[in-house]
Image (cartoon, rainbow, N blue to C red):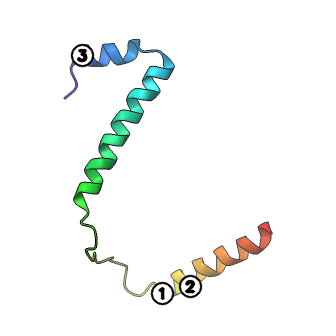
């Protein structure tokens, strides 16, 4: 839990220092997330059964949107 002193100190920071504090925290979180993944490991990706048509429709939509922007 954050202490009131820390919250007060963060609120007192100028905009640039607040952004830097956020960057430090986000970087720390990213490092922790990477630690959860093992390089070279295989992870199962669960997909809802029976939604193959939805995936195909999404692929067609994305392809059409690419053509519209060209």
Question: Residue 52 has which mark?
Answer: 1
Q: Secondary structure at mark 2?
A: helix
Q: Which residue is mark 2?
A: 56
Q: CA distance from mark 1 to mark 3?
A: 51 Å
- Give me the residue at 28% from left, 78% from top: 44
Q: Secondary structure at mark 1?
A: helix
Q: Which residue is mark 3?
A: 4
Tag 1 near tag 3, CB within 8 Å? no
- Using the rendered view, name the quadrant where residue 61 is placed: bottom right
- Give me the residue at 29% from left, 56% from top: 34
> Residue 40: x percent and y percent?
28, 73
Q: Judge by depth and name the residue closer to the eye, 43 or 54.
A: 43
Crowdedness near tag 2: few (<14), some (14–19) or many (≥20) residues, C-alpha within 10 Å: few
Q: Is residue 25 above or below residue 38?
A: above
- Give me the residue at 19% from left, 29% from top: 1
| Identity of the residue furthest to the front in this view | 40
Q: Is residue 61 above or below residue 17?
A: below
Q: CA distance from mark 1 to mark 2?
A: 6 Å
> Residue 42: x percent and y percent?
27, 77
């Amino acid at each position: 839990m954050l202490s009131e002193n820390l919250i007060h100190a963060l609120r007192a920071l100028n905009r640039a220092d607040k952004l830097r504090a956020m960057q430090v925290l986000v970087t720390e979180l990213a490092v922790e997330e990477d630690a959860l993944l093992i390089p070279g490991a295989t992870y199962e990706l669960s997909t809802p059964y029976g939604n193959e048509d939805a995936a195909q429709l999404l692929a067609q939509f994305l392809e059409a949107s690419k053509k519209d922007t060209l």
